[in-house]
Image (cartoon, rainbow, N blue to C red):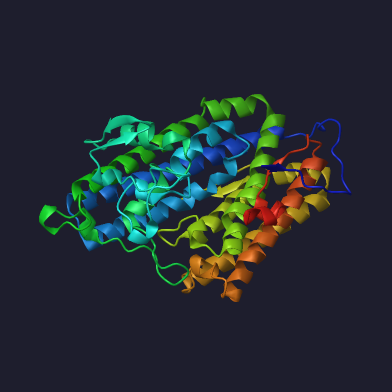
Amino acid sequence: MKIKLAISALACAAAAPAFAGKPEVVSTYVAIAHAGYEDSLIKARELQAAVDALLAEPSAQALEAARHAWLAARVPYQQTEAYRFGNAIVDDWEGKVNAWPLDEGLIDYVDPSYGGASDENEYAALNVVASPSFLLSGNEVDASQITPELLAETLHEADAIEANVATGYHAIEFLLWGQDLNGTDPGAGNRPWTDYAAADACTGGNCDRRGAYLKAATDLLVSDLEWMTAQWAEGGEAATSLAADPDAAITAMLTGMGSLSYGELAGERMKLGVMLNDPEEEHDCFSDNTHNSHYYDGIGIRNVYLGEYTRADGSVVSGESLSSLVSAADPAVDQALRAGLDNSVAKLGRIKIAAEAGTSYDQMLGGENQTGEALVMAAVDALVAQTQDIQRAVNVLGLQEIGFEGSDSLDNPDAVFQ
């Protein structure tokens, strides 16, 4: 769903003014994207090494190390999400690496309370880890060897059902943490390390196949990030196409900012969970890392506007920015948007602080937790207000009207309960 935010005091100009510096702004945008995806790749390779160590010598310590590597890998990746929505090359690819929510029963064993196949998804409890062969769309699938190809080409979004997520960060997250069965009470998933132990100590059954799935999913994540990093390098498809049309690139930048701010983050990832009081609406629901994912999404949006990104090694990539373009057109609009971005990051930061102090994001979604709900809704309100400022920036730059991604939770709340 796309929405158009009405800003009554401003109207789009007929043609984009010829502001100086657009190619340089696009160059900064591309450089930040390349750095962000490269950092994501570096961290994914560290996760890959931690997974290899876990599978070579399973232990509680090795599982914990792999979990920490996964958490670290999320920090740069979430900052790249501002490159979605405006860049088809990212949107066409992103579902491989960050699709959610998922029917985890497709992958591995689940608690009996999870249920089984449904009218919406007959593969919701397929349990590939326990199934060397199975029927899919009427055809028998040989899954005796769990490979990246099996996950990517056969299982992922099987039968065109989006909940059949077989690859990416969240499949790996589930395999490292297991289900979070705590509802809106404290606690994340608690998969035992013995789910990867040798046969005589194996819990959950099929430890060798579970390890093969974890290995295949992690290797696939690395190869997918290798591909995307190359697209933003000099001569890559994304870098080349954006440089060829700076006006379209500026539109893509603002489209990504507005759509992530509004429909995706404020709506689908935040307000919807509050409305439903449902911890299944958490973005990182197995690990209870949602507070960080939301926070770094907010940082990523601000990075695009300010033209500045702090890399995983502490170095900074920066250059000409959208902010400088907007300031040249209307300093007041630029100041308002910069303030709005700072405010949303601060509000998301308060959620992060509260979670790290012991109140997890899923606890904030419990209907009885008024303090937690207030923290989430303050960030939602800041993101919505920020999106209005982004629309004002679109207008003062004279760009064509942009339809940002919407969400029923914001635009038509009654539809959420229908």
* Percent x, y of residue 5: 77, 47
Give the residue at x 36% y 53%. 174
Say if 218 sits above or below 349 in the image. above
Q: Is residue 338 visible?
A: no
* Percent x, y of residue 404: 69, 43
Return the residue nearer the eye: 262 or 313.
262
Give the residue at x 74% y 53%. 337
Residue at the extreme left of the image, as rendered: 200
Picture mark count = 0
Return the residue nearer the eye: 117 or 159.
117
Quadrant of the rendering where the C terminus is positioned? bottom right
Quadrant of the rendering where the N terminus is positioned? top right
Residue at the extreme front of the image, as rendered: 119
Q: Is residue 243 visible?
A: yes
Give the residue at x 38% y 55%. 115
Return the residue nearer the eye: 192 or 183.
183
Horizontal side, residue 131 vs residue 83: left or right: left
